[in-house]
Amino acid sequence: MVGALYLHIPFCARKCAYCDFASWATPAGDALMGAYARAIEAQLDEAASLGLLEGCGTAYVGGGTPTLLGERDLGRLVEKIVEAASPSELTCEANPDSLGDEVLLALREAGATRLSVGVQSLDDGELCELGRLHDAACARERVAAAVATGLDVSVDLMCATPTQTLESWARTLEGAAALGVGHVSVYPLQIEEGTPLDRRYESDPCAWNDPEVQAQRMTQAQAALEACGYRRYEVASYARAGKTCRHNKAYWTGVPYLGLGTGASSMLDLKGYLRLCTACPQLPQAPDDARRVRLTVETPRGELAAKPSLSSLSFSLEFLTEPQAVAEDLMLGARLVEGLRPELVSRARELFGARFDDTIDALLARDLLADKNGRLAPTEQGWLLGNELYGALWDLAPGEVVVAKG
């Protein structure tokens, strides 16, 4: 019914300076965390009883900081995922400062297969500017411990940040590769409105974060990581052979997924949405022409912990027609090195006719797309000017997306 499962854990020891995610600073040992984890376990049982988790290939526990739950609650939650969905790939996010040996052991024994560690930088000054709790030594030691468990380990790195230089970025990239991880994700810092970082630099032009610097850092990352044996498979993702993240690829290839937890998003086909509606009478009827439904859980974490039933959740929704869903798949597929699936291109041509060919011709002429081994794929320029590439493909979508509350 869904190919992927996402669980959101909205707790952090402290909010980072750049973060606008659905997460809140929570004291260690707060009873709300355990109650919330048990509520998500109940929702997993309910989703499984509806048949929604049939065929689920991957699962991802994100946040927030899932490792803040501790070995008992996080281990129990992972065990429940394995019981309810049996994914062959199960990833848990972690921060170095809460990734103790007991948590690592609990994750491995409970059935996790991957760990994604939020390192961000291996420069102490940069970490301080970002508001991270760990230092570079802690990051190195905890990532090395994770690799030693036999879990597949990925690290997240952030570029175009305050005080970062070409030299410090090179040291971070080389240092991360030296830890023996199989996967590296690289993201330019986005300065989100209302965050402490935004307020700190509100009167500063932030030349260290302008688009040219972001492009330079991403190009530098590609050269450094490929020299260390990683292959880029998505605009922000690099992996050694056999270590790509299948869960991430699911997002870019139109695989239906279910999201549980405060702020979690789902993308369901019409059949999956109708199945969810049997347990959620609060959900509105889908428009006759809807073929894809996007849902986001709006229920606050405390309320969700107290009333875990799916029928108690509140959602925001978007209903997409088939042409809108195909345009979205084109936009997301353009993130991948392998490019657009031939069957997707054929369906887009059927739906959009000459508009599709005109759009593709324009993107080819601008060197944002290229024909690579018979597939339309993003160029280096296309990645660096991603908003223009993705926007042009999404603009093929006719009409306005229908929004609703439930």
Image: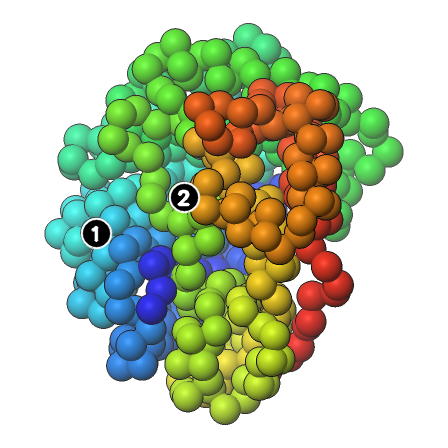
Q: Is residue 156 visible?
A: yes
Q: Secondary structure at mark 2?
A: helix
Q: Is residue 196 left or right of residue 107?
A: right
In the displayed structure, would residue 167 be above or below residue 192? above
Q: Amino acid at mark 2?
A: Lys
Q: How is the image coloured?
A: rainbow
Residue 245: x, y in percent?
34, 40
Residue at image mark 1: 88
Q: Residue furthest left?
A: 109
Mark 1 / mark 2, whichever is N-terminal: 1
In the displayed structure, would residue 100 be above or below residue 243? below
The residue depicted at 23 percent of the width and 69 percent of the height is 84
Q: Residue furthest bottom?
A: 281
The residue depicted at 22 percent of the width and 45 percent of the height is 113
Question: How many numbered badges does the structure rendering display?
Answer: 2
Between 152 and 392, the one nearer to me in the picture: 392
The image quadrant of residue 134 is: top left
Q: Secondary structure at mark 1?
A: loop
Residue 65: x, y in percent?
42, 51
Q: Residues within 10 Å of mark 2 (few under 14, many from 20)?
A: some
Q: Is residue 15 visible?
A: no
The residue depicted at 26 percent of the width and 63 percent of the height is 55
Q: Is residue 389 left or right of residue 179?
A: right
Label number found at residue 249: 2
Between 57 and 292, the one nearer to me in the picture: 292
